[in-house]
Amino acid sequence: MAKMVSLDNLLANAAVRRAEATPWLGALIGEATEKFAHVGLPNRRNEAWRYSDLSKALHEATRSESEQGAAPTLAGACVAAFENGVLDESQSTYGAMGARSLRQVLAENASPFASIIGRVNGQPDHPIINLNTALMEEGLVLRVPADVTLATPLHLRFNWRGGEPRSEDGRHLRILVVLEDGARATLFESHDGAPGFATVVTEVRLAAAAKLTHIRLENFTDAARQTAATLGEIGEKALYRGFYFSQGGHFARHEALLKLAGEEAHVGVDAAYMVADRRHCDNTTIIEHASPNTTSNQVFRGVLAGSARGVYQGCVKVAKGAQKTDARQLSRAMLLSHKAEIITKPELEIFADDVKCSHGATAGELDASALFFLRARGIPEAEARAMLVEAFLVEAMDAVESEAMRGLVANCARLWMRRHAGEASHVE
């Protein structure tokens, strides 16, 4: 980055934003700034960031850029196109489904969203969410009325090109999605290129019997530095169905912080990550069961090559009184190199006595017997290894119900395999 990220710069910019903001927004910025000032940028001394030192990553020289492909196109979707962190109206069609620019919402003195933005599944001590709240400017707000099903997905397209201004405070984007009773929608996020420093926070509030399908596709280049969070409140009999795919970056972290706030609410999260070279990829989840009779299921699958580092931190919290909770989490990682590293930290915090909770974690190499079986039938070693890697990930990708979206994810996986065929063809 041309200018060094520092706490002083970030706080100074937050003070400017607060002075220029509407009263309700100024109060929100002030509250977030005060909390962020006490903690600063997270580093290894923060337990939740022990394996992902953002402060260090922001001051490291990034590696030379890998080639950036074209941003994905989802046919038939309404698009909100963000170019280098700025909403590009000329490329966007989000207005067709009633979504609004965050800039417009933040400028309203009496916004109907003033009591929601920054309040979904509140994380008062989270440094990045507080930073994002203090500095957010760009983003999108979508409210779906009761019993309405959006016929087309909303594609949030974040594209970072080489011309991105490397400002001292980075870029900080906020998305708010509110689904009223019985509403249904599909949200597709794609992240491409190399943000110099960006935070992206997506707030999701699902009322009773609402359903949201949420797909995140990260296709960063080597120099990318981004930390993102999805905050969710899932109401009675509501359903959040998420799928996350990442290839990491110089620093890439996504947190799913989801609260099952009503009875019979369900959260299902599947994820696949493919990380090579010296990239860093962090998947962190905190699923909070705050009501009885709720269910959650998490399955994360990772493939790591070269000197890549993967982190999976999965925490399930069961509140007192949240009886009949059924929560499951599983992390599986495949290492294609002796230099690759996977850190897995599953956690259960249970304060109810009538629950079913489980977690599991495995890490290993390719199945030698399966590889021998394919080689014995005349399949070249490199192709055989690629087939086994694909088979390992296909179960996770099958969780994507939309054929078009599943195809975009599969295409990223195939491109990764071609790009890193040398690393996948043998164990270093």
Image: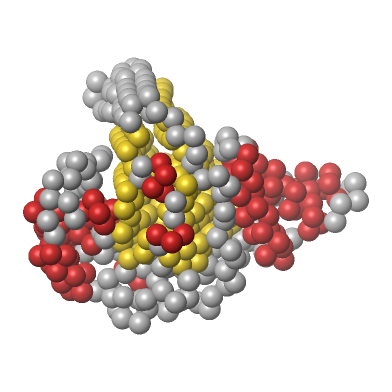
How many labels, in total?
0
How far from the left and from the top, in percent, is residue 346? 42, 41
Above or below, 357 against 157 in this view is above
Identified at 20% across, 59% down, the residue is 134
Above or below, 203 against 329 in this view is below
Question: Which of the pair 404/145 is nearer the observer?
Answer: 145
Q: Is residue 293 left or right of residue 190?
A: left
What color scheme is it? secondary structure
How far from the left and from the top, in percent, is residue 202? 34, 48
Identified at 84% across, 46% down, the residue is 374
Identified at 47% across, 47% down, the residue is 78
Q: Is residue 68 left or right of residue 261?
A: right
How far from the left and from the top, in percent, is residue 398? 62, 37
How far from the left and from the top, in percent, is residue 324? 35, 17
- Whether residue 45 is visible, yes or no, is no
- Whether residue 290 is visible, yes or no, is yes
Above or below, 68 against 74 in this view is below
Question: Which of the pair 422/189 is nearer the observer?
Answer: 189
Identified at 72% across, 66% down, the residue is 422
Instruction: Look at the image and tell me in which quarter the N terminus lies.
Output: bottom left
Q: Is residue 343 left or right of residue 58?
A: right
Instruction: Look at the image and tell me in which quarter the C terminus lies.
Output: bottom right
